[in-house]
Image: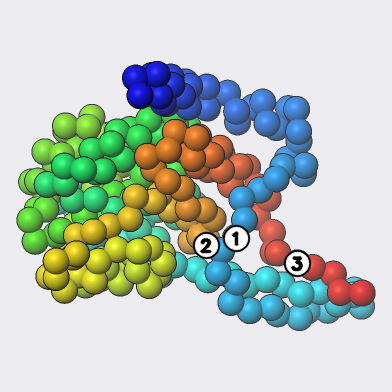
Amino acid sequence: MKSNRSRKYIIGFAVAFLLPLSFYLIAIFKGKDKLSLPKHYRLIALDTVVINQQVYQDSIFYQVPDIVLTNQLGKEVHLNQDLKNKVLVIQFLFTNCNSVCPAITKNMGVLQKAFKKNDTLVQLISITVDPARDSVAALRAYAERFHVNHDRWWLLTGDKQAIYTYAKEYLELEIGNGDGGVEDLVHSDKLVVLDEQRVIRGYYKASDPFDLKRCADDVVLIGMEKKRKHRLKIK
């Protein structure tokens, strides 16, 4: 058990200190056109178009709607409108959680360190599933506990039903219903990555250092990918 903990500790720091180099190493050794990019989730339609007498199909993917919440500094923010051109890494927590939340938050801290020199690419987002107790002051104290950079990592509270709709319907995570029941605060241990178009690009187990590394790598790849339609030529 001790060796496993040590292994996770080493891997975590490897993510933090080696990731910034991957921006350059991936481009140099593979080239942007040869990258294996993260998949797109929730295909909703195929649109047929004709270009230069060739028939193509454009893949249209679900775009996660905006949500208005309040961050740990007391500022009202819009995730889509205020964070244009940024990749989002989203987690859910509550500050009184004594099980998975502290560990997941520490791993979000690893991502914060990893992108310290490239912090304009990604925004870290932690949303409480217990907004009744997680006030702005509570989130601010929690943020200080985990050495959060307030500009690059938002801890958010707001309307409870809006939060649960966002998590369950828009991001398709398995959490409680938000109705005050016994399992109301049972929440996902997943990180969700949204690209600049707010298309879901990946789900990652936040407690798994290997998945954390994969999440970090995918954020890098999304930042490097060409902005183009997902077009398939029809013979």
Q: Residues within 10 Å of mark 3 (few under 14, many from 20)?
A: some
Residue that numbered label 1 is attached to: 40
Q: Are marks 1 and 2 in contact (CB under 8 Å)?
A: yes
Residue 172 percent location from the top left of the image: 41, 67
**Would you identify the image quadrant in which residue 29 lies?**
top right
Say which residue appears at 23% left-offset and 38% top-offset.
102
Q: Residue at point 52% right, 53% down?
A: 202
Is tag 1's residue or tag 2's residue first in the polypeptide sequence? 1
Determine the residue positioned at 43% across, 21% down.
Answer: 7
What mark, if any, has residue 114 been given in the picture?
Answer: none
| Closest to the observer, 205 or 132 | 205
Identified at 92% across, 74% down, the residue is 235
**Lower position in the chain sequence, tag 3 or tag 2:** 2
Across and down, in percent, residue 73 comes to 16, 46
* Residue type, mark 3 in image: Arg
Relative to 57, say whether 203 is above or below. above
Camera-nearest label, 1 or 3? 1
Q: Which residue is mark 2?
A: 199
Q: Nearer the viewer, residue 124 or 189?
A: 189
On the question of residue 82 being in view, the answer is: yes
Classed neighbour count for the residue bearing mark 1: other residues with Cα under 10 Å, few (<14), some (14–19), many (≥20): some
Asked if one can make out residue 160 in the rendered structure from this viewpoint, the answer is no
Relative height, residue 228 to residue 234 (above, below) = above
Residue 31 as seen in the image, left or right of residue 211: right
Q: Which residue is mark 3?
A: 231
- The first of marks 1 and 3 along the sequence is 1
Q: CA distance from mark 1 to mark 2?
A: 7 Å
Q: Amino acid at mark 2?
A: Val
- Amino acid, disc 1: His
Q: Tell me the CA gap for discs 1 and 3.
A: 13 Å
